[in-house]
Image: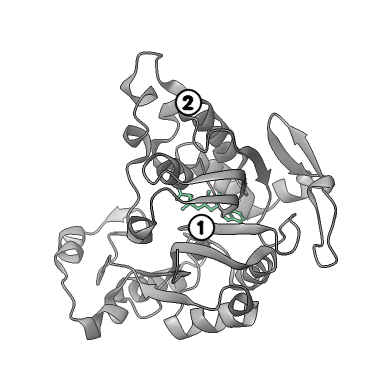
Amino acid sequence: MSTSLNAKISLNDFQLRDGIYFPNDYEQLNSTEQKQRWDEIGKTYYGSQKIEQAEETSPLKQDYTLLTGRPGGTWNKFPINKSVDSILEIGCGYGRIPLFLSKDKNLRCQKYYGIDISESLLRRLLKCKQEYDFFPGAEFYIICASAELLPLEDNSVDLIISNCVFMHIPEAQIRNLLVEVSRVLKPGGTFVFNHSFHNKSCPSHIIHNLVRRLNPKQNSVYLKQYSSAEINAMLTTSGMKTKCPQYIVEPTQEYAILPETIKGIQIPFANSINRSLKPSAAMKETLAYGYSAYSSQL
Ligand SMILES: C[S@@+](CC[C@H](N)C(=O)[O-])C[C@H]1O[C@@H](n2cnc3c(N)ncnc32)[C@H](O)[C@@H]1O
């Protein structure tokens, strides 16, 4: 794969081992706290290790939803029977979203690029691909790296997706990542960043932030939150408008006034109180747990 003028790296700078592209300076990435955290979380993330432990006769082997469930939010709006040349997924984990899009929405592609910092999750993605054969016939490029530098050419990807990832990434990295995403998206391409940003005005996050300030070392999995104006400004600055002029930044439909856990301790009734919230249109931007951003024409 050739390197374009603007791409700072290409897959030529990676080594392919066991179906995964690793950067040449993998030791350096391995020494980061962010990578170590996600390698650890990845060992049991969403019970995904069950796929490795399942017997040949286990129903899990036949029915992918027993492993992943069905993701909601913007994914429900995704059209059926769409076909694209290439898909890039940021923070693909073990493949929950491509599984759903391939199996439930019959999305087809020629090339799937999945980038994630967690080697344990990527190994499981390959296992899931083997078990469930999502995006049959597509070329798979599975890349273990932090996503703020993308080893892909300018204007090379038709569809870029991400689910619940950006809230785990520091702001400076997100800004670089969005510039990179805008760079590699084809003009007229589409994107879905479902449940990607946490909402700055949500009371549950405000309480969490207060607790975190008392013990800043704890729970650095969730980082900064944003308003819709800030998300729009980041997307504009990244250059996304020149590739995909029409997109929506929308509050998610999960609402919360109380954190459900603090420092791993369950807060009584928080879950049922949060689930019972039915905010008026005016209150949705305040109580929504997060934001999604996606192309108006999917
Ligand atoms: C909450 S999980 C979501 C995984 C997957 N998208 C899903 O919906 O199941 C967050 C994912 O982001 C990945 N991640 C965190 N920081 C990252 C970074 N800097 N670059 C790439 N991936 C990252 C984690 O390894 C993890 O797979």
Number of the label disc, if any, that sits on residue 131: 2
Circle 1 residue: 162
Locate the C terminus and report the quarter of the image it occupies: bottom left
| Residue in front for this viewpoint, 60 or 266 | 60
Badge 2 crowding class, 10 Å Cα cut-off, few under 14, some 14 to 19, many 20 or more, is: some
- Numbered label tally: 2
Amino acid of disc 2:
Glu
| Residue in front for this viewpoint, 258 or 213 | 258
| Residue in front for this viewpoint, 204 or 286 | 286
Q: Residue at x 18, y 77 (%)?
A: 279
As displayed, is residue 148 above or below residue 284? above
Amino acid of disc 1:
Ser
Picture coordinates of residue 218, whole percent (x, y): 48, 60
Report the Cα–Cα distance between label 2 and label 1: 22 Å
- Name the quadrant containing residue 59: top left
Of mark 2 and mark 1, the one earlier in the sequence is: 2
- Name the quadrant containing residue 260: bottom left
Q: Residue at x 37, y 61 (%)?
A: 74
Q: Is residue 80 visible?
A: yes
| Residue in front for this viewpoint, 151 or 213 | 151
